Image (cartoon, rainbow, N blue to C red):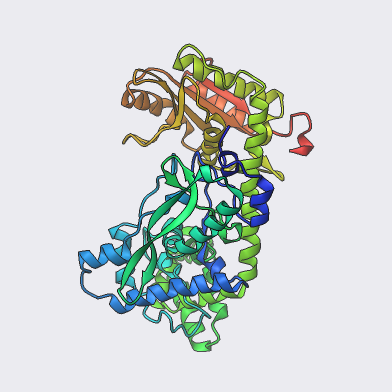
Amino acid sequence: MDIYFSDHFKVKEKELEKYGAFNISLVADLPLFIDPFLLFNSKKKKYQELHDNIIKYLIFLKKKSTFQTIDTGALKAWYVFKEVEQNWLGFSVTGNKGRALGPDFGRALNANLHKIFHEFGQEKVSKGSHLEKLCLIKDGVGKDNISDFATNLIKEFLLEYTQNFAKKYIDEKLRDKFRVQRVRFNYKTESWEDVVFDLPKFWDDFVILTPKELLTKDETWINKKDLFENFERIPNAISDDELRFKVNNYFLSRIPRDPKKKKEPTKQEKISAAFATIQEFPQLIDYYIKSKEENGDLAESISSEKVIFSQNFYINNVQQFIAGLQKTDFYASAKNSYEEAKKKIEILKEYIENNEGYKLFYHNGQRIKGEKDLQLLFGLVCHESTAFDVNREVNNGRGPVDFKVSKGSVDKTLVEFKLANNKKLEQNLQKQVEIYEKANKTTSSFKVIIYFTEDEYKKVVAILNKIGLTGKENIVLIDGRNDNKISASNA
């Protein structure tokens, strides 16, 4: 079953490991991304140069930017980029098609080159310049935007990195020459140039490998959540006594207090006070970044752990799970989509509850946390060409359905995978099934609910009793606990 790069291109996983590249899936994006801070903090000269090149391009944009509305032509030529979907990393719901860095991102960047980045390239507090500064203040600019922008600006390196591996380890029949657009920026002509590369070919497109040491998961090292949740530590890093006093005093003044009630301020009240304080003292952003720079080695350590976790969770666990399912009828076809979905769910339930399948959800004692990860895991496991298509479904305007099992346009059954700890589970069970069925013109659907504790099980049972769904064939509960299984200590 060709799910991963190593499968499709017939290379040994140990060769990828030795080269330092992440073994990407060619079924769906894995939720990892490039953190530009890992370039900045690297001890490798090549990576430092890549970060310098990102900053060089931003300085170029700053010189060209204007306080006025940016020219549409300049916006498209310099600020707008397609997502580098060929690296198969990111946050796509299905496949590898994500959102591009469109005009909104370009306008936000242009507007802030004279605000947030007014000292860009000439910082007085932090050691270096950082693109991530943009996501600390501007709403709607997140880790995906920062990673996509950085990936575009180091694309030439990634293409060369992939080409070198491909020429050494991948058969010529599985490669092709591609003219890749917008690879290298020419500062003399002030334009992006195309370059031809010999790359791994998947369908009609190329594939890009990424060094594991540039990847992280969840958040970039410099991020808005961390800034606001740990704001109270920042003033302590200010050497100027007067400024430190003003900052602390202003922050405390913005926290609502009722002298009659001895109640601690809420987390949201503190975050709101922190936001107001940063608006009043924008130089605090630089002090925050300085503190992140000083703990840069921790960024590398944490990111490395997250990559190892991802490799085990999204690759090793899935491979072992599939190997077990291949001994069953899971990948055989049934007579219609409803029976196909029912069969697959029944086999999943049996394999997870009564064999070693529950290990899919665990790594070193940590278990799956979010439904997106749950859906991704089952998407990887269910990917196989049979008489039925089993695909992650796109958003139809009423919310995305997790999976659609279909043969043609008429015979289709929907499958939703949910975690028992979902706070909206009752609402979802009551409303969403019929909404999804109507939107997809079908009356067939299943809800699969995974629980990991006895309390979660009792919660689900109570909900099903309350809304009259107990005993329904299309509502399936799966016990994903590791504390009531054989060999649980090895999970």
Most extreme residue toward the front is 172
Residue 280 x, y percent position in the rendering: 38, 76
Q: Is residue 454 visible?
A: no
Question: How many numbered discs?
Answer: 0
Residue 9 x, y percent position in the rendering: 57, 42
Q: Please say if 98 is above or below 463.
A: below
Nearer to me, 163 or 356: 163
Residue drawn where x is 52% and y is 43% of the image: 174
Residue drawn where x is 46% and y is 16% of the image: 338
286 on left or right of 309: left
143 on left or right of 491: left
464 on left or right of 148: right
Classify residue 67 by image quadrant. bottom left
Nearer to me, 126 or 98: 98
Residue drawn where x is 31% and y is 57% of the image: 102
Residue 8 x, y percent position in the rendering: 56, 39
307 on left or right of 137: right
Image quarter where the C terminus lies is top right
Classify residue 406 by image quadrant. top left
Nearer to me, 100 or 225: 100
Nearer to me, 51 or 9: 9
Image quarter where the N terminus lies is top right
